Image: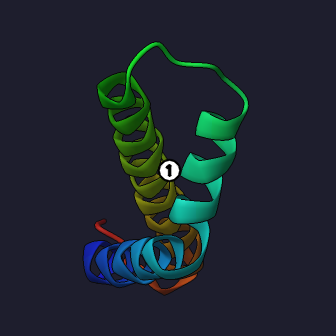
Amino acid sequence: MRYLVSMIFALAGLMVAVLYLSSEVANWVVAQQSFDSPDTAGSMHMLAFVATNFAALVVGWIVGWIVATPFARDAG
């Protein structure tokens, strides 16, 4: 049950990040640097977007794991 709750929280965190956070973070990261070519700027934007989404996925998983821990059945 703990894994299911963790997956649900991870997906919820990912959706929130995709909709509201990742694009803003990626735009900010790209705006802080100067680039020689548009391809490099696009690659950095994509990297920041994906990294933010991955971080949100991990944070959502951890929060779900913590929330579900009291409801986990004792294995013994």
**x 44%, y 80%: residue:** 9
Quadrant, the N terminus: bottom left
- Residue identifier under label 1: 52
Q: Where does residue 28 sit, x and y in percent of width and height?
A: 69, 46
Q: Is residue 15 left or right of residue 62?
A: left
Closer to the camera, 55 or 42? 42
Closer to the camera, 6 or 50? 50
In the depicted structure, whether residue 49 falls above or below residue 71: above
At label 1, the amino acid type is Thr
Judged from the image, the secondary structure of the residue bearing numbered disc 1 is: helix
Determine the image quadrant of residue 45.
Answer: top left
In the depicted structure, whether residue 44 falls above or below residue 5: above
**x 30%, y 75%: residue:** 7
Q: Is residue 62 left or right of residue 46?
A: right
Quadrant, the C terminus: bottom left
Q: Where does residue 35 sit, x and y in percent of width and height?
A: 52, 18
In the depicted structure, whether residue 59 falls above or below residue 51: below
**x 66%, y 23%: residue:** 33
Extreme-front residue of the structure: 37
Extreme-top residue of the structure: 36
Closer to the camera, 69 or 7? 7
